[in-house]
Amino acid sequence: MVIVRLGLDQQDRKMTDELYDQFLRLVGQAILDPTVEGERRVWHPLTITFRGPSASQTDSDPNPFLDYRPQVIFRGPSGQTYNVPGFFDGDGHGGPAGNVWRVRFAPDQPGRWTYKASFRHGPQVAVALERDAGRPAALDGVSGRFTVASSAESAAARALGGFSPFDPTAPPGPGLLQWGRLEYVGGHYLKFRNGPYWIRGGTDSPENFLAYAGFENTTPSHTYADHVEDWHPGDPDWGNRRGRGIIGALNYLASKHVNSIYFLVMNIGGDGQDVWPWAGKPNPKGNPNNDNLHYDV
Protein backbone atom coordinates (compact mmCIF):
# COMPACT_ATOMS: atom_id res chain seq x y z
CA MET A 1 0.00 0.00 0.00
CA VAL A 2 1.25 3.47 -0.89
CA ILE A 3 0.05 6.55 1.01
CA VAL A 4 0.60 9.93 -0.61
CA ARG A 5 0.53 13.14 1.42
CA LEU A 6 -0.73 16.13 -0.59
CA GLY A 7 -1.24 19.83 0.03
CA LEU A 8 1.35 20.41 2.73
CA ASP A 9 2.66 23.81 3.68
CA GLN A 10 4.46 25.09 6.74
CA GLN A 11 1.37 26.62 8.36
CA ASP A 12 -0.62 23.41 8.10
CA ARG A 13 2.19 21.01 8.94
CA LYS A 14 1.42 20.46 12.64
CA MET A 15 -2.26 19.77 12.06
CA THR A 16 -1.45 17.61 9.06
CA ASP A 17 0.96 15.48 11.10
CA GLU A 18 -1.72 14.92 13.73
CA LEU A 19 -4.33 13.97 11.15
CA TYR A 20 -1.80 11.79 9.35
CA ASP A 21 -0.99 9.89 12.56
CA GLN A 22 -4.70 9.44 13.25
CA PHE A 23 -5.19 8.12 9.73
CA LEU A 24 -2.31 5.66 10.13
CA ARG A 25 -3.75 4.41 13.42
CA LEU A 26 -7.07 3.70 11.71
CA VAL A 27 -5.29 1.95 8.84
CA GLY A 28 -3.24 -0.09 11.31
CA GLN A 29 -6.31 -1.19 13.21
CA ALA A 30 -8.08 -2.10 9.99
CA ILE A 31 -5.46 -4.06 8.03
CA LEU A 32 -2.33 -4.61 10.10
CA ASP A 33 -3.61 -7.32 12.41
CA PRO A 34 -0.90 -8.50 14.81
CA THR A 35 0.13 -12.15 14.96
CA VAL A 36 0.62 -14.18 18.13
CA GLU A 37 3.35 -16.82 17.91
CA GLY A 38 4.51 -19.42 20.40
CA GLU A 39 2.98 -22.21 22.46
CA ARG A 40 -0.06 -20.87 24.26
CA ARG A 41 0.74 -22.56 27.54
CA VAL A 42 1.34 -21.18 31.00
CA TRP A 43 4.81 -19.61 31.36
CA HIS A 44 5.74 -20.21 27.74
CA PRO A 45 6.99 -17.07 25.95
CA LEU A 46 4.69 -15.61 23.33
CA THR A 47 5.75 -13.14 20.65
CA ILE A 48 3.24 -10.65 19.27
CA THR A 49 4.30 -9.12 15.97
CA PHE A 50 2.94 -5.79 14.75
CA ARG A 51 3.47 -4.22 11.33
CA GLY A 52 4.10 -0.54 11.95
CA PRO A 53 6.26 2.35 10.77
CA SER A 54 9.14 1.36 8.50
CA ALA A 55 12.61 2.16 9.82
CA SER A 56 16.25 1.14 9.74
CA GLN A 57 18.57 0.47 12.66
CA THR A 58 20.72 3.42 11.54
CA ASP A 59 17.89 5.97 11.20
CA SER A 60 18.18 9.14 13.28
CA ASP A 61 15.11 11.17 12.33
CA PRO A 62 13.25 9.43 13.77
CA ASN A 63 15.42 6.94 15.64
CA PRO A 64 13.42 3.70 16.02
CA PHE A 65 15.06 2.99 19.38
CA LEU A 66 14.64 6.46 20.87
CA ASP A 67 11.77 8.26 19.13
CA TYR A 68 9.16 5.49 19.32
CA ARG A 69 7.74 3.87 22.45
CA PRO A 70 5.78 0.65 21.88
CA GLN A 71 4.15 -0.83 24.97
CA VAL A 72 1.50 -3.51 25.34
CA ILE A 73 -0.86 -3.97 28.29
CA PHE A 74 -1.87 -7.59 28.92
CA ARG A 75 -4.93 -8.40 31.03
CA GLY A 76 -5.37 -11.92 32.38
CA PRO A 77 -8.35 -14.06 33.39
CA SER A 78 -8.21 -12.85 37.01
CA GLY A 79 -7.92 -9.20 36.05
CA GLN A 80 -4.15 -9.04 36.50
CA THR A 81 -2.40 -6.57 34.19
CA TYR A 82 1.15 -6.37 32.89
CA ASN A 83 2.61 -3.42 30.98
CA VAL A 84 5.34 -4.83 28.72
CA PRO A 85 7.70 -2.72 26.57
CA GLY A 86 8.05 -3.63 22.91
CA PHE A 87 10.94 -3.16 20.49
CA PHE A 88 11.86 -2.53 16.86
CA ASP A 89 12.89 -5.74 15.08
CA GLY A 90 13.84 -4.67 11.55
CA ASP A 91 12.41 -7.03 8.96
CA GLY A 92 11.68 -9.68 11.58
CA HIS A 93 14.37 -12.04 10.28
CA GLY A 94 17.56 -10.34 11.44
CA GLY A 95 17.60 -7.71 8.71
CA PRO A 96 18.32 -4.12 9.82
CA ALA A 97 15.39 -2.43 8.06
CA GLY A 98 11.68 -3.13 8.01
CA ASN A 99 8.37 -2.47 9.72
CA VAL A 100 8.31 -5.21 12.35
CA TRP A 101 7.68 -4.27 16.00
CA ARG A 102 7.41 -6.95 18.65
CA VAL A 103 6.66 -7.65 22.27
CA ARG A 104 7.32 -10.83 24.26
CA PHE A 105 5.26 -12.04 27.19
CA ALA A 106 4.93 -15.20 29.32
CA PRO A 107 1.36 -15.64 30.65
CA ASP A 108 1.06 -16.82 34.24
CA GLN A 109 -2.47 -18.27 34.16
CA PRO A 110 -4.57 -20.38 31.80
CA GLY A 111 -7.65 -18.85 30.24
CA ARG A 112 -8.50 -15.90 28.05
CA TRP A 113 -6.07 -12.99 27.80
CA THR A 114 -6.49 -9.65 26.07
CA TYR A 115 -3.90 -7.11 24.99
CA LYS A 116 -3.89 -3.50 23.88
CA ALA A 117 -0.98 -1.63 22.33
CA SER A 118 0.20 1.86 23.20
CA PHE A 119 2.46 3.36 20.54
CA ARG A 120 3.89 6.83 21.06
CA HIS A 121 6.05 8.85 18.69
CA GLY A 122 8.19 11.90 19.42
CA PRO A 123 11.72 13.10 20.24
CA GLN A 124 13.25 10.81 22.90
CA VAL A 125 9.82 9.48 23.86
CA ALA A 126 11.32 6.06 24.62
CA VAL A 127 13.04 7.45 27.73
CA ALA A 128 10.25 9.84 28.77
CA LEU A 129 8.49 8.99 32.04
CA GLU A 130 5.18 10.67 31.23
CA ARG A 131 2.45 8.31 30.00
CA ASP A 132 1.23 10.81 27.39
CA ALA A 133 4.68 11.90 26.17
CA GLY A 134 4.88 12.39 22.42
CA ARG A 135 1.81 11.69 20.37
CA PRO A 136 -0.10 8.54 19.37
CA ALA A 137 1.19 6.89 16.22
CA ALA A 138 0.31 3.95 14.03
CA LEU A 139 -0.63 0.83 16.05
CA ASP A 140 -1.77 2.87 19.05
CA GLY A 141 -4.90 1.23 20.42
CA VAL A 142 -4.58 -1.98 18.40
CA SER A 143 -5.95 -4.83 20.52
CA GLY A 144 -6.50 -8.56 20.42
CA ARG A 145 -6.96 -11.69 22.46
CA PHE A 146 -5.60 -15.19 22.86
CA THR A 147 -6.33 -18.22 25.02
CA VAL A 148 -3.75 -20.02 27.15
CA ALA A 149 -4.32 -23.73 27.73
CA SER A 150 -4.31 -25.27 31.18
CA SER A 151 -1.72 -27.86 32.13
CA ALA A 152 -4.09 -30.75 31.49
CA GLU A 153 -5.24 -29.27 28.18
CA SER A 154 -1.63 -28.85 27.11
CA ALA A 155 -0.89 -32.46 27.97
CA ALA A 156 -3.91 -33.63 26.04
CA ALA A 157 -2.97 -31.59 22.99
CA ARG A 158 0.70 -32.49 22.95
CA ALA A 159 0.85 -35.73 24.98
CA LEU A 160 3.97 -34.37 26.64
CA GLY A 161 5.70 -36.55 29.20
CA GLY A 162 3.17 -39.35 28.97
CA PHE A 163 0.63 -37.61 31.20
CA SER A 164 -3.02 -38.53 31.01
CA PRO A 165 -5.10 -35.82 29.30
CA PHE A 166 -7.05 -35.53 32.56
CA ASP A 167 -4.08 -35.42 34.93
CA PRO A 168 -4.19 -32.02 36.71
CA THR A 169 -0.54 -32.38 37.69
CA ALA A 170 0.67 -32.33 34.09
CA PRO A 171 3.42 -29.66 33.97
CA PRO A 172 2.88 -26.68 31.66
CA GLY A 173 6.36 -27.03 30.24
CA PRO A 174 9.69 -28.84 30.47
CA GLY A 175 12.53 -27.87 32.77
CA LEU A 176 12.23 -24.59 34.62
CA LEU A 177 9.22 -23.55 32.54
CA GLN A 178 6.99 -25.76 34.67
CA TRP A 179 7.63 -23.59 37.73
CA GLY A 180 7.20 -20.12 36.29
CA ARG A 181 9.09 -16.92 36.96
CA LEU A 182 11.46 -16.26 39.83
CA GLU A 183 10.16 -13.96 42.55
CA TYR A 184 11.47 -12.35 45.71
CA VAL A 185 9.55 -13.77 48.66
CA GLY A 186 11.22 -11.89 51.51
CA GLY A 187 14.09 -14.29 52.11
CA HIS A 188 17.65 -14.78 50.96
CA TYR A 189 16.79 -16.91 47.91
CA LEU A 190 14.50 -16.31 44.98
CA LYS A 191 11.61 -18.75 44.56
CA PHE A 192 9.74 -19.99 41.53
CA ARG A 193 6.09 -18.91 41.49
CA ASN A 194 4.88 -22.51 41.25
CA GLY A 195 7.94 -24.37 42.44
CA PRO A 196 10.93 -24.58 44.78
CA TYR A 197 13.59 -22.08 45.74
CA TRP A 198 16.27 -21.44 43.14
CA ILE A 199 19.88 -22.18 44.09
CA ARG A 200 22.17 -20.85 41.40
CA GLY A 201 24.55 -23.33 39.82
CA GLY A 202 26.09 -22.38 36.52
CA THR A 203 29.04 -20.98 34.63
CA ASP A 204 30.68 -17.56 34.90
CA SER A 205 33.19 -17.98 32.10
CA PRO A 206 33.82 -16.72 29.56
CA GLU A 207 32.19 -13.46 30.53
CA ASN A 208 32.66 -12.31 26.91
CA PHE A 209 30.57 -15.27 25.78
CA LEU A 210 28.97 -13.11 23.05
CA ALA A 211 32.31 -12.24 21.41
CA TYR A 212 31.50 -14.97 18.93
CA ALA A 213 32.84 -15.38 15.41
CA GLY A 214 29.37 -16.19 14.11
CA PHE A 215 28.01 -12.73 14.91
CA GLU A 216 28.48 -9.88 12.46
CA ASN A 217 30.24 -6.70 13.55
CA THR A 218 31.84 -8.60 16.44
CA THR A 219 35.41 -9.32 17.51
CA PRO A 220 35.80 -13.09 16.87
CA SER A 221 37.28 -14.02 20.25
CA HIS A 222 35.45 -17.37 20.38
CA THR A 223 34.36 -20.03 17.87
CA TYR A 224 33.21 -22.80 20.27
CA ALA A 225 34.38 -25.25 17.62
CA ASP A 226 34.42 -28.13 20.12
CA HIS A 227 30.67 -27.73 20.60
CA VAL A 228 29.56 -27.74 16.97
CA GLU A 229 28.87 -31.45 17.46
CA ASP A 230 26.46 -30.54 20.28
CA TRP A 231 24.23 -28.65 17.85
CA HIS A 232 21.10 -30.63 16.90
CA PRO A 233 18.95 -30.50 13.75
CA GLY A 234 16.13 -28.04 14.29
CA ASP A 235 18.19 -25.81 16.59
CA PRO A 236 18.67 -22.15 15.64
CA ASP A 237 21.26 -21.54 12.94
CA TRP A 238 22.16 -18.77 10.50
CA GLY A 239 24.48 -18.02 7.62
CA ASN A 240 26.67 -20.91 6.56
CA ARG A 241 26.33 -22.91 9.80
CA ARG A 242 27.54 -19.86 11.71
CA GLY A 243 25.24 -20.46 14.66
CA ARG A 244 26.21 -24.01 15.48
CA GLY A 245 29.18 -23.32 17.74
CA ILE A 246 27.44 -21.07 20.24
CA ILE A 247 24.13 -22.97 20.13
CA GLY A 248 26.03 -26.20 20.65
CA ALA A 249 27.81 -24.66 23.64
CA LEU A 250 24.44 -23.82 25.19
CA ASN A 251 23.21 -27.35 24.50
CA TYR A 252 26.27 -28.72 26.26
CA LEU A 253 25.65 -26.58 29.33
CA ALA A 254 22.01 -27.66 29.36
CA SER A 255 23.07 -31.31 29.22
CA LYS A 256 25.05 -30.72 32.42
CA HIS A 257 21.90 -29.32 34.07
CA VAL A 258 23.31 -25.91 34.88
CA ASN A 259 20.58 -23.42 35.73
CA SER A 260 22.37 -20.15 35.01
CA ILE A 261 24.96 -18.56 32.77
CA TYR A 262 26.70 -15.26 33.42
CA PHE A 263 28.07 -13.07 30.64
CA LEU A 264 28.37 -9.43 29.66
CA VAL A 265 26.33 -7.79 26.94
CA MET A 266 28.71 -4.81 26.82
CA ASN A 267 32.34 -4.49 27.88
CA ILE A 268 33.37 -1.31 26.04
CA GLY A 269 35.92 0.46 28.19
CA GLY A 270 36.50 -2.68 30.24
CA ASP A 271 39.09 -5.39 30.00
CA GLY A 272 37.64 -7.46 27.13
CA GLN A 273 36.51 -4.63 24.84
CA ASP A 274 34.97 -7.08 22.38
CA VAL A 275 31.22 -7.16 23.13
CA TRP A 276 28.65 -4.46 22.39
CA PRO A 277 24.99 -4.32 21.29
CA TRP A 278 25.23 -1.33 18.96
CA ALA A 279 25.30 -1.03 15.20
CA GLY A 280 28.54 0.24 13.70
CA LYS A 281 32.04 -0.09 15.06
CA PRO A 282 32.52 1.78 18.35
CA ASN A 283 35.88 2.60 19.88
CA PRO A 284 36.30 -0.44 22.15
CA LYS A 285 38.29 1.57 24.68
CA GLY A 286 35.29 3.85 25.18
CA ASN A 287 34.78 7.29 23.69
CA PRO A 288 32.14 10.03 24.11
CA ASN A 289 31.73 10.01 20.33
CA ASN A 290 30.63 6.36 20.26
CA ASP A 291 27.11 5.95 18.88
CA ASN A 292 25.15 4.38 21.72
CA LEU A 293 21.71 5.13 20.26
CA HIS A 294 21.49 2.64 17.39
CA TYR A 295 21.34 -1.08 18.07
CA ASP A 296 22.32 -4.02 15.90
CA VAL A 297 19.07 -5.76 15.04
Image (cartoon, rainbow, N blue to C red):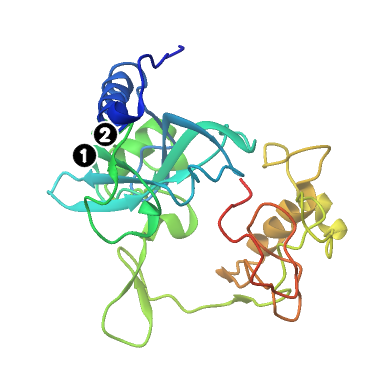
Q: Amino acid at mark 2?
A: Thr
Q: Position of residue 138 (x, y in %)?
A: 33, 30
Q: Residue furthest bottom?
A: 188
Furthest residue toward right: 225
Note whether 187 is above or below 269 in the view shown: below
Mark 2 nearby-residue class (10 Å; few <14, some 14–19, many ≥20)? some
* 111 with respect to 193 (left or right): left
Quadrant housing the C terminus: top right
Q: From the viewer's perspective, is 7 left or right of 130?
A: right
Query: Tags 1 and 2 in contact by the CB under 8 Å rule?
Result: yes
Q: Is residue 79 left or right of residue 198?
A: left
- Quickly name the residue at label 1: 111
Residue 195 pos. (x, y %): 34, 66
Report which quarter residue 288 is drawn in. bottom right
Answer with mark 1 or mark 2, whichever residue precedes in sequence.
1
Quadrant that contains the N terminus: top left
Instruction: Give the SS element for disc 1.
Output: strand
Up the image or down, 30 lies above or below 152; here it is: above
- Residue at the disc numbered 2: 147
